[in-house]
Amino acid sequence: MKDVVIAPSILSADFAKLGEEIAQVEAVTSFLHIDIMDGHYVPNLTFGIPVVQSIRKISKMVFDVHLMITNPMDFFEPFAKAGADMLTFHIETVDDPDVAIEAVRKLGKRVGMSIHPDTPIEKILPYVTKCDLILIMSVRPGFGGQHFMEESLSRIAAVRKVIDENGADTVISVDGGICRDTASRVVASGANYLVAGSAVFSNDDHARAVEELLQCAKS
Ligand code: DX5
Ligand code: ZN
């Protein structure tokens, strides 16, 4: 994937009308970011497998499931069966990242690996070319609506360097604090997959918000 894409994060959607919220963004983008939180790896809870199963029935979008949970290996298969297309786990939550990558591949799903802002970026570099996507957290995981951490830009650039040096096509995702201002800067640093929660769903016209973010990202 060379083009820049926006993946709305349903964390900031109105759950009373989740189907309608997804339909609005599905009109303008193909990727949906789904945050799973367990109250252990992050100090917050969201939702689980039944919600993914339900929205799978009403959407053809690529489901990008972001597992912010301490035991992701236990949940790869249930989320794959529920309809995930891509499973992203945190490097901090697995004993052996290679084993986790292989477990996702065996399920026939795309592999994403994420890194917490407190973890040195060097930790993830050996795995960059083995994954379909590297998700660089640009806020402390757990909540929407936080401010973008500027130090994320050099972390994105470090991952981009490895991808380009190896001629790989791993996608670089950035998650947290993406808005019209930060969108162009993360792309300039090498990101090409921008997760956006509040910037999309706090705007009454979600589709328009996605398109505006995309324009900023490409400018
Ligand atoms: C935070 C989540 C994000 C969140 C981003 O831990 O992983 O996906 O939805 O929200 P915004 O875009 O509002 O920073
Ligand atoms: Zn996320």
Image (cartoon, helix red, strand yellow):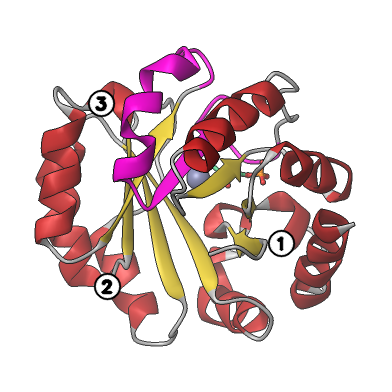
Whether residue 37 is visible here, answered yes or no, is: no
Per the image, label 2 sits on a secondary structure element best described as: loop
Tell me the CA gap for discs 3 and 1.
29 Å
Would you say residue 31 sits in the magenta stretch?
no
Of the numbered discs 3 and 1, the one sitting upstream in the chain is 3
* Residue 188 drawn at (x, y percent): 78, 42
Q: Which mark is residue 10?
A: none
Q: Which residues are magenta?
A: 117-145
10 displayed left or right of 41: right
Whether residue 2 is visible here, answered yes or no, is: yes
What residue sits 14% from the left and 22% below the top? 95
Per the image, label 1 sits on a secondary structure element best described as: helix
Q: Dot 2 corresponds to which residue? A: 83
Q: Dot 1 corresponds to which residue? A: 201
Per the image, label 3 sits on a secondary structure element best described as: helix
Q: Dot 3 corresponds to which residue? A: 93
Would you say residue 127 sits in the magenta stretch?
yes
Say which of marks 2 and 1 sits in front: 2
| Front residue of 143 and 26 | 26
Name the kind of residue labelled 3 in the image: Thr
157 displayed left or right of 140: right
* Residue 78 drawn at (x, y percent): 14, 60
Tell me the CA gap for discs 3 and 2.
22 Å
